[in-house]
Every structure is written in C-alpha cells, then in structure tokens.
Image (cartoon, coloured by chain):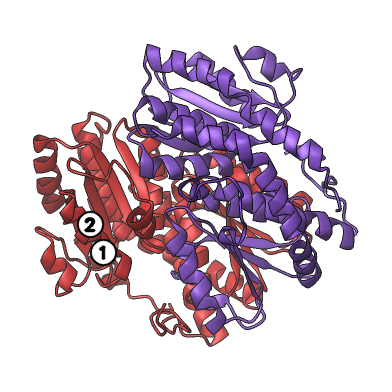
Chain colours: A red, B purple
C-alpha cells in the first residue's frame, strides 16, 4: 500500500497513548491547585483540532473551555486569558510565529501551559516547563488532556475503561480502516483530481476535521480549491450554489451531531450527482465498544482521508510537502 | 440611487436605537435576578451576527458569552444551557425550524430568553414573554443587549455617551457611507458578476459580516460561489490557492483585530492582481468619535456591501428574493 508502514503507524498511536501517565501528572497537579478556564489554542490545523475538543466538551462538561486562534487571542484577546486559566496547545515545529508569541503572553499573564511540541529541540519546547515532545497524534493528545480534566469533574466515569480499550485496540483498528479505505481513496482521488472547487461538509467533533482537511490538506498541500461548511449551516446559504456536477463530500461521524451530517447526506442526491458520503459507521473498529465509537470518529475519518491523500499526491504528481507561499515569503 | 430610500433608512436605524429603553428594562431585570452565561443563538446569518458580538465581548468582558448555532445546540448541546443562562436571538420570520425548537428547549430548561422577532404576529413572537418586534437592524439589537450587560458589569462606562452619539449621528453616517460607496459598488459588481469563486477575508467583529456576506448574500441571494476565510487563518492553508486572477476581497475594520486584516491586505498584491480592499477607515462617519468607530465597523461594512448588492442584482438580472432550494424543498 502506498505511503503506508503498518508497524510505524501502530507504534505511533500506541506511543501517543503511552503519554497518558505524563498527561495525567500534569493535569492532576493543575486540578489540585485549581483553575478557571481552559484555552485550546492553535492556528490553522491545530486550531481546528482545538475546535473538535471544545465542541465535545460543550456537550459533556461544565468546564469552561474555549478554542482560540492564537492570532485572535493576540489582538482582540480574551479577558479570561489570565491567571487561573490553562492554555493547551500542540505544535509540530514549535516555530509558528503566532504560537511563539502566545506563549510569551501566557507567561506574562501567569496562564499555565500544557504543551505538546513534536520537536524536542525546538526553542519553544525548552521554554515551557514539562513540555511533552512526541511526534504526531495531535488529536489524541488534546482529547487526553480534556478527558483527564473531565474525569476529575466526574464527567467521564468511563475514563479508565475507555483508555484501556484504546490501548488494546485503537492502533490496529485505525490501521484496518486505512486498509479498507485504500481502494476508495484511489477512486476518490481519480474522480476529483481536476476539481475546480470541492465542497466538504461536516459536523460535531468532525467539523474541525472537515475544516482542516479542506484547508490544510487540499488547499495547502494539494493546491485544490475547497470550501468547508458546517452541516448545520449548509441549508442556510450554501445549498443554493450546488448543482448536478458540483463535487460535495460529506463527513458523517458517530458523535452527537451525526443527525446534522445525515440530513445533508439525505438531501444531496436530490440536487447533486457528484457527491460522496464518507461515514465512519462503515468501518468495523474491532475491539472498540459501540458507545466509544463517537469519541474517535475524527480519528477514523483521518485514517480514511490519509488514503485519499496518498493517492491524490501520486496521481496529480504534486508532492504534498511543497509550498508555494507558506514560509517561503514574508508576511 | 438604486434601491435606496434615504428617509426610510434613517427611520429604520433611529427606530432600532429607540428600542433601547425596552432592552434596558429586560436586561436590568435579569441582571438584578442574576444569571450565569449568555448564549447568542442563531442559524446562518443570525448565527454570524452572534459571532460578532461574542468576539467583541471576549476581548472586553468577563461575562461568559457563547455564539451558538441552534442546530448544534439541539444535538450535541451545551451543559451550560440551563437554568441561570440567558438566550438572546434575533429572527426575521420567527419560523426557522431550528429556532422554533431551540425556544422550546430553552423553556424546558428554564433558560431565560431575550428575543427580537421582526414579525410581531409570528407564532414564535407570541410565545415569548416580552419579545421585541421591530424590523431589521439585527446587529444593532444584539450589541445593544451585550452593551447593557457589560454596562452593569462596569465594562462599558461610555455606555450613555456612546448611545447618545449613535442616536445623534449613526443613521445619517450610514446613509452617507452608502452614498459614498455607490460608485464603488457598481464597479465592483461589474468586475465580479461572472466570478466562478470569490474569496472574502475578514477578522474581528467583521468576521461574522464576512462569513454571512459570502454565504447569505452571494451564495444564497446572488448564486455566486464564495469562500469566506478568517484573516487569522488565511496564511495557514488558503493562501496557496490564490493566483494572479483569483478574486479576493478583504474586509478591513477598525476594531482590535484590524492588524490581522491589514496583514492580508498588505500581502495580497505580491501574489494577486484581482484583489479588493474595503476599509471602513475610508468612510468619514460624521459625529462619531474616533474611539467608537471600531464598535460600528460591521455596520459601516454592511452599508458598503448593500451598494454592491443593489448593483449586482440589477446587472446580473438575478432578483435577490428568489431561492432555488431554500424553503422550496423539504430537508
């Protein structure tokens, strides 16, 4: 299979899950000392990952949690971003300008920081006490933090059981999803390689995945135009520009907002003949209990879209690592 | 001037400002009785108006305020949407399915409601105690509510002075903006009538305006494809798909996030020859103090875009009131 190293992926997910002890130690200390609000801060893809966590927390927790774009926080700001607040972020390089600046601001305001910086030798990583360095798996890391806070708030009593299942079965289940999705990924890439504009629709904890897949993968890495739209908003404007040939893909997950994505999926065939439904329910996830499937829908979808990316990169002859402007020009 | 009745617009804005006594009576009673969180709830354009208020409040108030899409609130929900919370919404028809249902849920949970329903005889309006019925000016109404809560929280000491200025000068200032923007509106409509895809970029209190202008006006009413992108996110993906001929419009306001929009405006000319900057700073706003200009940038931008709409409707021979699918099909 193209761009696929089974053992490496198993190790990657299992290694991320093993960070839990470290995450718990950090969160437990903060809970003991007391805190006010949680800020999941990022830019682009990392901001999108924060949105996913916060959507989940809103429906399941009384903790005040915000998904914030670092650049917005640096300008208009938040009055609640102050002593007592906790900033949680994940960064690959640790060098994104906005993230470097927001860490400075957090320190100035005595906001505590829980940080994941993939590169252990990034200057930013060294500046933050107890920064966790481990590559990839950003979504898993952020949810681990949220779950631990919720566990202490008696809002996730299944915590131990859920993570035991994840440790036993998640890595293999995601690898199996990739294998099953591979043929679909190729067909999808072939069908949409030359799209002028592709619409991605999603909801719930998958909304962040939808937003970032469109922007960080298709726009940034494949240089194909997209619009991402929340399934709840689809019927309030965007539907009017969909015609028979318009490429529209709906991400359907198994969390609480599933009915919103299903509604779009049900409606589309009436007005469009170029739509695709990607439903996490179509993937088995061996060893994962029914009640936990919604909690990892975003990971399942990511496994599916990875197969699209692998094939799209190859058939379009456009290596995903090249950038036209990003970090190549000053702005 | 096309689709422009000066006296009617003056009366409309001044009439909306006169609702303030009623708004104050409602808010003052809630403040006296105590409250926990504010939920600005909507769908589509009304959701976008809520986003504007919440962005403003985040930076200027300690009050917990959330912008929520009604459909999301009805599915994944919010644990904080319960007794003690206050739901604020504005609706033109009072018949949008999601809004009707969210009012039911709010009542069930004993969430207090501050409602603006344009049609006084809408069933929804009759169901809500003290519902305010007055046409249009949604953004003004929602900010009036927010400002009164903030006034009581000692976060807007200029409250009386600000609204005195608005009552004296806002309506005329906005009419003057429309007059000044008319020639621009025509030229812009002529240049972009046949766009395959138009990008709108904005930030801060103008982000809601950017999002809803793209979706509720160009997509829903003009049937032209758009993508709206937050200026803070522009550099994290979308920039890669901009080429010389790509139509990109940046909304630049005068609120705290102005630097984010300015950054995109400064960068664009290097990679694009089909961009437009609409800057509220280019409009005089007679009688409005410098320090209050940022508080009404979204209204100024709306006055400018109204001129685009009037001309675009005429030259494209596409009446803005027709819908292809919205409320014409079941979904």
**Where's residue A213, x and y in %?**
48, 63
In the image, residue B125 sits, relative to residue B173, either above or below, namely above
Residue A183 position by quadrant? bottom right
User: Residue drawn 61% across and 49% down?
Assistant: B286
Relative to the observer, which residue lies in front, A144 or A322?
A: A322
At x 75%, y 67%, the residue is B188
Left or right placement of residue B316 versus residue B307 in this view: right
Disc on res. A21: none
Q: Is there CB contact under 8 Å for labels 2 and 1?
A: yes
Which residue is disc 1 drawn over?
A: A101
From the image, tell me which residue sits under label 2. Answer: A105
Identify the residue shown where x is 48% and y is 67%: B262
Q: Is residue A284 left or right of residue B88?
A: left
Q: Chain of mark 1?
A: A
Residue B21 place in picture, x, y as percent: 57, 19
- Nearest the viewer among B66 and A144 is B66
A209 or A125: which is nearer to us?
A125
Mark 2 belongs to chain: A
């Amino acid at each position: 299979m193209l761009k696929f190293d089974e053992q490496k992926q198993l190790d990657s997910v299992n290694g991320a899950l093993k960070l839990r002890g470290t995450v718990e130690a950090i969160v437990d200390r903060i809970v003991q000392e007391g805190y006010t609000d949680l800020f999941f801060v990022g830019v682009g893809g990392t901001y999108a990952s924060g949105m996913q966590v916060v959507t989940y927390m809103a429906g399941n927790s009384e903790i005040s949690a915000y998904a914030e774009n670092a650049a917005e926080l640096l300008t208009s700001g938040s009055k609640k971003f102050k002593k007592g607040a906790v900033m949680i972020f994940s960064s690959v390089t640790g060098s994104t300008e906005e993230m470097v600046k927001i860490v400075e601001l957090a320190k100035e305001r005595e906001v505590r920081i829980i940080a994941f910086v993939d590169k252990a030798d990034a200057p930013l990583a060294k500046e933050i006490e107890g920064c966790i360095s481990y590559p990839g798996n950003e979504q898993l890391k952020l949810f681990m933090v949220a779950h631990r806070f919720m566990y202490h708030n008696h809002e996730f009593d299944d915590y131990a059981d859920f993570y035991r299942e994840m440790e036993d079965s998640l890595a293999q289940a995601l690898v199996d999803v990739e294998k099953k999705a591979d043929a679909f990924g190729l067909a999808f890439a072939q069908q949409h390689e030359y799209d002028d504009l592709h619409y991605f629709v999603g909801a719930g904890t998958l909304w962040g995945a939808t937003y970032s897949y469109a922007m960080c993968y298709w726009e940034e890495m494949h240089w194909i135009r997209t619009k991402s739209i929340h399934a709840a908003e689809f019927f309030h404007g965007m539907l009017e520009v969909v015609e028979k040939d318009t490429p529209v893909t709906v991400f359907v997950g198994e969390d609480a907002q599933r009915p919103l994505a299903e509604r779009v999926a049900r409606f589309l065939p009436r007005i469009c003949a170029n739509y695709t439904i990607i439903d996490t329910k179509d993937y088995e996830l061996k060893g994962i209990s029914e009640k936990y499937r919604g909690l990892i829908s975003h990971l399942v979808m990511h496994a599916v879209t990875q197969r699209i990316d692998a094939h799209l990169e190859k058939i379009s002859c456009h290596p995903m690592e090249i950038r036209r402007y990003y970090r190549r020009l000053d702005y």
